[in-house]
Amino acid sequence: MQLRSEIQIASMIKAMKDVVIPAVDGDNRLAVEQAQLVVGMLSLMAHQLPLQFRFDRDELQRLLAYTQGLTELCSADRALGEAVRQLAGCRAAGAAALERCAGDPAQLNAAIRELRQAAGALVSAAADSSDEAAYRQVESAVLELSKEQLLRDRSLVLPQGWEPDPTAVPPIETLLDAGTG
C-alpha cells in the first residue's frame, strides 16, 4: 500500500504498460486507444502533480494583483461600491490564504524525511543506552505514534476497499490535524 501519489501513479503506469495493454486485444482499436490514453493522462498527472501547488499559488498571486487593479479602476464609481467592498473582502481573505501557503510541499516532505531520520537515529541510540527505563519510555512513544500513523494511513486509503470493516476506520478528515488541536 503506497500513500504517496507519485509512487501510486508510477505503479499504475507500469501496470498499464506491462500487464493491461499487452492483454488488450490488438484488433480492438478503441480499447487499445483508451488504454494508451489512460497511460498518457497518468503520465501528465505525474508531471503536473509536483507543480500543482505552485501553479495554484501563482494563480492566486496573479488574481490578487488583477483584482487590486480592478479595485483601483472601479473604486471611484459609487454605483459599484458594494461590489468593490465584496471584492476587497475576498482579496483580504485571498492574501491571508496566500501568506499561510508560503511554504512549498517539497520543503514539507523534506522536513518530514529529515525528522523521521533524526528520530530514528535517536531511537536507535536509546536502544543502545544503558538506561532501560528511558528506553521503555521511548519505545512507548514510538508505539503510540505508530498507532496514530497506521490509523491515518488506513483512513487515507479507505476508498481502495481493503478494510474488512470500513466503519471501524474514521474518515481521514476527522483525523487530519487532530494532533495539533
Image (cartoon, helix red, strand yellow):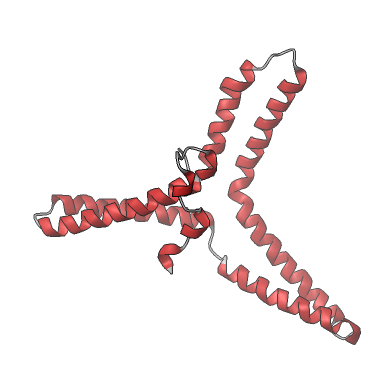
Does residue 154 appear left or right of residue 47 in this picture? Answer: left
Q: Is residue 56 above or below residue 87?
A: above
Which residue extends farthest left? 130
- The x, y position of residue 147, in whole percent, is 34, 51
Q: Nearer the viewer, residue 148 or 74?
A: 148
- The x, y position of residue 142, in whole percent, is 27, 53
The quadrant holding residue 126 is bottom left
The quadrant holding residue 56 is bottom right
- The x, y position of residue 78, in whole percent, is 89, 87
- The x, y position of residue 3, in whole percent, is 48, 44
Which quadrant would the N terminus be assigned to in this image?
A: top left
Q: Is residue 32 above or below residue 58?
A: above
Identified at 40% across, 63% down, the residue is 179
Q: Nearer the viewer, residue 11 or 142?
A: 142
Identified at 43% across, 69% down, the residue is 181
Identified at 48% across, 44% down, the residue is 166
Does residue 15 appear left or right of residue 74 in this picture? Answer: left
Q: Is residue 70 above or below residue 61?
A: below
